[in-house]
Amino acid sequence: MQISVLTMFPEMFGDFCAGPIASRASQKNIARIQVVDIRSFAPGSYRRIDDSPYGGGAGMIIRCQPVLDALDSVRREGSHVVYFTPAGKTYTQKDAHRFAEMKDLIFLCGHYEGIDARIYSSVDEMISMGDYILSGGEIPCMAVMDSVLRLLPGCLRDESIRGESFENGLLEYPQYTRPADYRGERVPEVLLSGNHEEIRRWRLLQSLLLTRKLRPDLFSAHQLTEEEKRLLVQEP
């Protein structure tokens, strides 16, 4: 996979690219990450990439020329361009799986009050991380990259992914480690039993109960299997 990041602040991605997920993907040739500085495509010695909006108003708008030139430098046939903006659809785990199937992703990080609207026709998709305001698209971009890279074959063990929250529409079950008894609070006995089938059923039930309690929206959208129905009926 090729991932190209277009940003005005490439230094923000240094630690991310050196982190465990991104560096493992690069070292194993699972993904190639390229961070492109949009400023380098702005003309003049000051490399100015923003300007005041036509018609007046507060804030500065990113000019279309440096962004589109930066995009042209990395875009190829089959590239999928994603722009991070509050106007986009809310990102989900299904999107992460969809992106993980792609061969060439380009992430465009906005900043300031926004970008020149003439850029919109050059992007394939707009993504939002939620109904709140951030200073730019760099943090959402890193979140999306992490969610995608960890799904690529060879980046993580398959079993590390299958049981995670949202993979099956449910929250992940509670997990414990040593000691078995700490300050009077014990690990559930079933996890110490060695009975793998009982542990599996307990974990499934706990996922169902946690999701119903903490994320009723997810629970109502989840299609219960016959086994899940039986487990919930048996729960006192």
Image: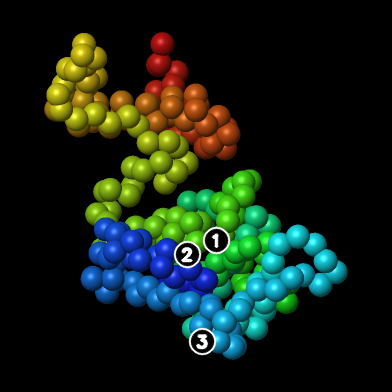
Q: Residues within 10 Å of mark 2 (few under 14, many from 20)?
A: many
Residue type at mark 3 is Ser
* Residue nearer the viewer, 218 or 113: 113
Residue 156: horizontal and vertical position, in percent? 27, 56
Going by the picture, which residue comes out furthest to the right?
55
* Residue nearer the viewer, 44 or 140: 44
**Residue under the image location 47 percent in, 30 percent down:** 211
Secondary structure at numbered mark 3:
helix
Asked whether the beta carbons under mark 3 and mark 2 sit within 8 Å of each other, the answer is: no
Residue type at mark 2 is Phe
Q: Residues within 10 Å of mark 3 (few under 14, many from 20)?
A: few
What separation in Å lies between label 3 and label 2 (alpha carbons)?
Answer: 21 Å
**Where, quadrant-wise, is the C terminus in this rendering?**
top left
Which residue is disc 3 drawn over? Answer: 73
Residue 14: horizontal and vertical position, in percent? 35, 66
Residue type at mark 1 is Gly
What separation in Å lies between label 2 and label 1 (alpha carbons)?
Answer: 17 Å
Q: Is residue 205 left or right of residue 106?
A: left
Q: Is residue 169 left or right of residue 130?
A: left
Residue 149: horizontal and vertical position, in percent? 36, 62
- In the rendered image, the vertical position of residue 212 relative to residue 120, given as above or below: above
**Residue under the image location 53 percent in, 77 percent down:** 38
**Where, quadrant-wise, is the N terminus in this rendering?**
bottom left
Residue 223: horizontal and vertical position, in percent? 52, 37
